[in-house]
Image (cartoon, rainbow, N blue to C red):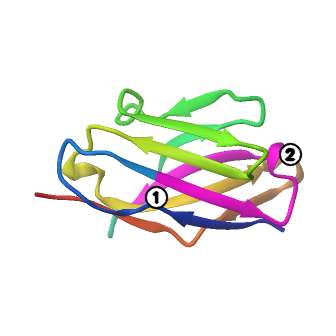
Amino acid sequence: QVQLVESGGGLVQPGGSLRLSCAASGSVFSFYTMGWFRQVPGKQRELVATMTSGGRTNYADSTKDRFTISRDNAKNTVYLQMNSLKPEDTAVYYCNAARLSVGREYWGQGTQVTVSS
């Protein structure tokens, strides 16, 4: 079992930056692919970025030049640095931990990010 707690969301002006954090507990963090997804009302949850246990990253086309995912296995924490934020980045951001080889996937409760002037 993995518990995920996100933090760092809030209101920011267009062009600004935020850093989201996701603290994990309950299992061996380093074995999991960690990711960030986001969702707006009426739309499907979409990929923002992921990082495998080996450090390989994957980004959505809309975020790869502005967002950076990183992880600190010693702190059981994954981060999402978001720069040059746009109003269309407004969403609830969810942390995800996946170890699909053993059929395990977990979600955090989500943190709201609002980009508005």
Q: Position of residue 102 (x, y in %)?
A: 89, 52
Q: Secondary structure at mark 2?
A: helix
Image mark for residue 110? none
Give yes or no for residue 108 being in the magenta stretch.
Answer: no
Name the residue located 86 percent from the left edge and 60 percent from the top edge. 27
In the image, farthest residue toward the front:
75
In reply to whether residue 30 is colored magenta, the answer given is yes
Quadrant where the N terminus is found in the figure = bottom right
Could you tell me how far apart the alpha carbons at marks 2 and 1 are, in whole angstroms?
22 Å
**Lower sequence index among marks 2 and 1:** 1
Residue located beneath label 1 in the image: 45
Q: Nearer the viewer, residue 56 or 105?
A: 56
Determine crowd level at label 1: few under 14, some 14-19, many 20+ residues with C-alpha closer than 10 A. Answer: some
Q: Is residue 102 above or below residue 65?
A: below
Nearer-the-camera pick, 51 or 72:
72
Residue ranking furthest to the bottom: 109
| First to last magenta residue range | 20-39
In-image side of 30 versus 77 (left or right): right
Provide residue 101's location: percent of width, then percent of height.
86, 45
Predominant secondary structure in magenta?
Answer: strand
Judged left or right of residue 28, residue 5 is left
Residue 62 in which image quadrant = top left
Q: Quadrant of the C terminus?
A: bottom left
Check disc 2 and report the residue beneath it. Answer: 101
Badge 2 amino acid: Ser
Question: Which amino acid type is shown beneath numbered disc 1?
Answer: Arg
Task: Give the x, y percent position of residue 21.
Answer: 55, 55
